Image: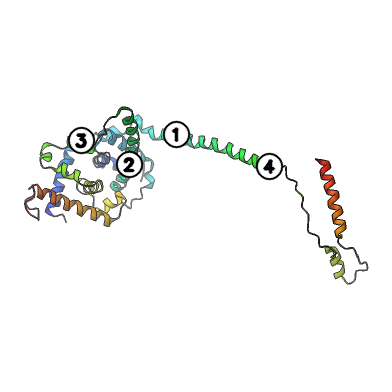
Amino acid sequence: MHHGAIKTEIEQYHNDCYGWALHCCNRDREMASEVLQTSYLKMLEAQNSFSGRSKFKTWAFIIIKNTAIDALRKKKRENRFIRNENNLPEAGYETGLEDKFDQKLKDLFFAEALNQLSERQREILQLVFYHDLSLNEAAEVLKISQGSVRKHYDRAKKFLAVWFQQRGIVTNNKYDGFI
Amino acid sequence: MMDLFEKKIRELYQEKRKLDEKSFPHFSVFLNKPEMKKPVRRLRMLYIRVASVAAIIIPVIFFLYYLYNSNKTGQQVLEISPVKINQPLPSQSLLNSVQDASYIWQWKAPTDRLLQDVDQSLNIRKYKKI
């Protein structure tokens, strides 16, 4: 794939890429922008490594995920140093998440429900429902087996169903009266 | 196929996505930024690190090599081929094997006494050198 074509692809999936970067950076916008910037550069430099076997979106998500992991490690090291110096509290996931949800979703406890899930389960739900990837594509992005993705997905779904039932948001087992 | 519950979760996620997308920066913001050269600087740092490690390791290797060889110079290298006492030399065996040879060399390997004398003379030369 040549330079111009890959640039067009990136532009086409820009919103998806930004959304995924935001999720990978625990909804830290500044960090997500930096990660996305570096990821785009990596994509342009490594354009020959895109064989076309997988979807461009999947390939881009893998690069973003790896870049975000590096950035988070770096930030963690820096934060450790700052905390030791000034005893500042560490920024949590929940704070950023709540800011981004509107009042309606907050009322539905959706953000809270998601926070009860494991990181892996949140990632899978994000890829499937937010970015419209299939479970197989999600497995490719997260570099885990398809069986494992299915297991995490089912557990997350069951957990959410029970969680909403307990709070009276879901009326029966078939979730007919959901919300 | 998604069931009803999955559809509802998807709806929630898509609402969240719509809200997020309102504040997403445009794609053009991410191109032509000066920070795009940042990873190159990191790569340079990598080269500097590799070069500095090499600058430390190579002199250490040379120093160790020098130490190893300096110990070796004190040793006297003396190779003595084994001699079978009172046995014909290889050259004698060769002559014996040729039937037409008119000259028979009856020379034999040196005796014990002769070898002792040689050792003594070698020792004397060695001490004289020191």
The residue wearing badge 2 is A69
| Circle 2 SS class | helix
x, y percent for residue A60: 31, 44
Q: Residue at x 29, y 45 (%)?
A: A61
x, y percent for residue B59: 58, 36
Name the quarter where the C terminus of chain B is drawn: top right
x, y percent for residue A6: 32, 43
First of labels 4, 1 by sequence position: 1
Amino acid type for the residue under numbered disc 1: Met
Amino acid type for the residue under numbered disc 4: Asn
Q: Residue at x 28, y 46 (%)?
A: A57
Q: Chain of mark 4?
A: B
The residue wearing badge 4 is B71
The residue wearing badge 3 is A95
The residue wearing badge 1 is B45
Place residue B95 in its image quadrant. Answer: bottom right
Q: Are marks 4 and 1 in contact (CB under 8 Å)?
A: no
Residue B23 in the figure: left or right of residue A39: left
| Circle 4 SS class | helix
